[in-house]
Image: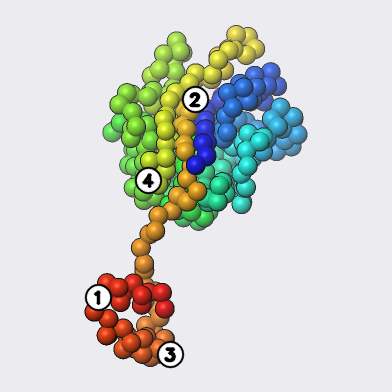
């Protein structure tokens, strides 16, 4: 098994060279493996400026409207990126990866503030998983959802819950912790709401060692705090093969193939003599 540390943070803009340098230096010093940033405000034409302060792999969604998401990888991390998918609005970034012979997908999201916009956005997330994820059983979705699952008066909550239900995902904080886990800080820097989440496929749940919140240290220009969100940190022990044995499923369209049906009838005659029905069935499935 290999260990992977994930960090997810709404950074409230990173176009300031000073702030970007401080944040990237902090992530380097704490040996963060994979970092998901929201509200980066990054613009594609300045990509070289951003990467001058980060020495590992960096993928980001272009944002012209104070949005943007980034996924960064530690320089020495031996990980293969299969493909990258970015939404035009700068709110979704999905990567399909291989690490230690395991395929999995990471989706970084920054949801809208408006409940009405969030409803359609959360429905879009479901479609993105189906369309772009190569491993629907090995998914991590993290980021700023701008939504508290406990608020029943929020019309977007049901759509958020559907993301969990439709993709068999677990809210990792709720699964591993008993405390509130407030991630958003109000003007007095007091934790006030949980709107940042780390959702994982069930296959990842038992691999999670811990989940904690960290406040980004220091200030940037004018004595401003680095973010009004706490950073979610998750440590995983990644197995060489997250996928279980699964179950056998027959392709029923083959019943329309007369040649296949005839051949199967011949095979079934040969297996009728087996005393153990289970053994006969298991052997037949390999033919």
Left or right, 74 with respect to 119, comes to: right
Residue at image x 60%, y 8%?
Answer: 223
Where residue 170 appears, as percent x and y from the top left, is 36, 41
Which residue position is annotated with label 3? 259
Where residue 125 appears, as percent x and y from the top left, is 46, 46
What secondary structure is marked by label 3?
Answer: helix
Which residue position is annotated with label 2? 231
Question: Nearer the viewer's eye, disc 1 or disc 2?
Answer: 1
Judge by depth and name the residue closer to the eye, 180 or 123.
180
Instruction: Tell me which numbered mark, 3 or 1, is placed earlier along the sequence.
Output: 3
The Cα atoms of the two marked residues, 3 and 1, are separated by 28 Å
Instruction: Tell me which numbered mark, 1 or 4, is placed earlier along the sequence.
Output: 4
Asked whether disc 3 touches disc 1, contact meaning CB atoms under 8 Å apart, the reply is no
Mark seen at residue 276:
1
The Cα atoms of the two marked residues, 1 and 2, are separated by 56 Å
Asked whether disc 1 touches disc 4, contact meaning CB atoms under 8 Å apart, the reply is no
The Cα atoms of the two marked residues, 3 and 2, are separated by 59 Å
Question: Nearer the viewer's eye, disc 3 or disc 2?
Answer: 3
In this rendering, the answer to whether 246 lies above or below 125 is below
Residue at image x 24%, y 79%?
Answer: 275
Residue at image x 65%, y 22%?
Answer: 25
Left or right, 99 with respect to 48, comes to: left
Which residue position is annotated with label 4? 202
Instruction: Tell me which numbered mark, 3 or 2, is placed earlier along the sequence.
Output: 2
The Cα atoms of the two marked residues, 4 and 3, are separated by 40 Å
Q: Residues within 10 Å of mark 2 (few under 14, many from 20)?
A: many
Instruction: Tell me which numbered mark, 2 or 4, is placed earlier along the sequence.
Output: 4
Instruction: Tell me which numbered mark, 4 or 3, is placed earlier along the sequence.
Output: 4
The quarter of the picture where residue 61 lies is top right
Where residue 113 appears, as percent x and y from the top left, is 46, 31
Q: Is residue 183 visible?
A: yes
């Amino acid at each position: 098994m290999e260990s992977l540390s994930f960090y997810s943070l709404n950074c409230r803009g990173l176009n300031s060279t000073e702030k970007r340098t401080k944040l990237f230096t902090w992530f380097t010093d704490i040996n963060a493996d994979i970092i998901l940033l929201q509200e980066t405000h990054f613009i594609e034409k300045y990509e070289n400026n951003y990467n001058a302060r980060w020495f590992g792999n960096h993928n980001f969604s272009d944002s012209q409207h104070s949005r943007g998401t980034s996924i960064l990888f530690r320089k020495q991390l031996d990980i293969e990126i299969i493909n990258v998918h970015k939404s035009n609005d700068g709110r979704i970034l999905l990567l399909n990866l291989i690490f230690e012979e395991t395929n999995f997908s990471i989706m970084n999201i920054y949801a809208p503030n408006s409940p009405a916009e969030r409803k359609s956005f959360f429905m879009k997330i479901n479609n993105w998983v189906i369309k772009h994820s190569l491993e629907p059983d090995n998914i991590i979705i993290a980021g700023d959802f701008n939504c508290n699952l406990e608020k029943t008066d929020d019309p977007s909550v049901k759509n958020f819950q559907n993301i969990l239900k439709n993709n068999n995902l677990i809210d990792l904080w709720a699964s591993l912790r008993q405390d509130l886990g407030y991630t958003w800080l109000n003007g007095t820097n007091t934790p006030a709401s949980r709107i940042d989440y780390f959702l994982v496929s069930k296959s990842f749940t038992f691999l999670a060692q811990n989940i904690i919140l960290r406040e980004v240290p220091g200030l940037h220009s004018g004595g401003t705090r680095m973010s009004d969100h706490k950073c979610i940190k998750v440590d995983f022990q990644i197995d060489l093969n997250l996928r279980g044995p699964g179950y056998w499923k027959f392709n029923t369209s083959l019943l329309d193939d007369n040649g296949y049906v005839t051949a199967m009838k011949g095979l079934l005659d040969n297996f009728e003599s087996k005393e153990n029905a289970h053994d006969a069935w298991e052997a037949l499935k390999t033919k």
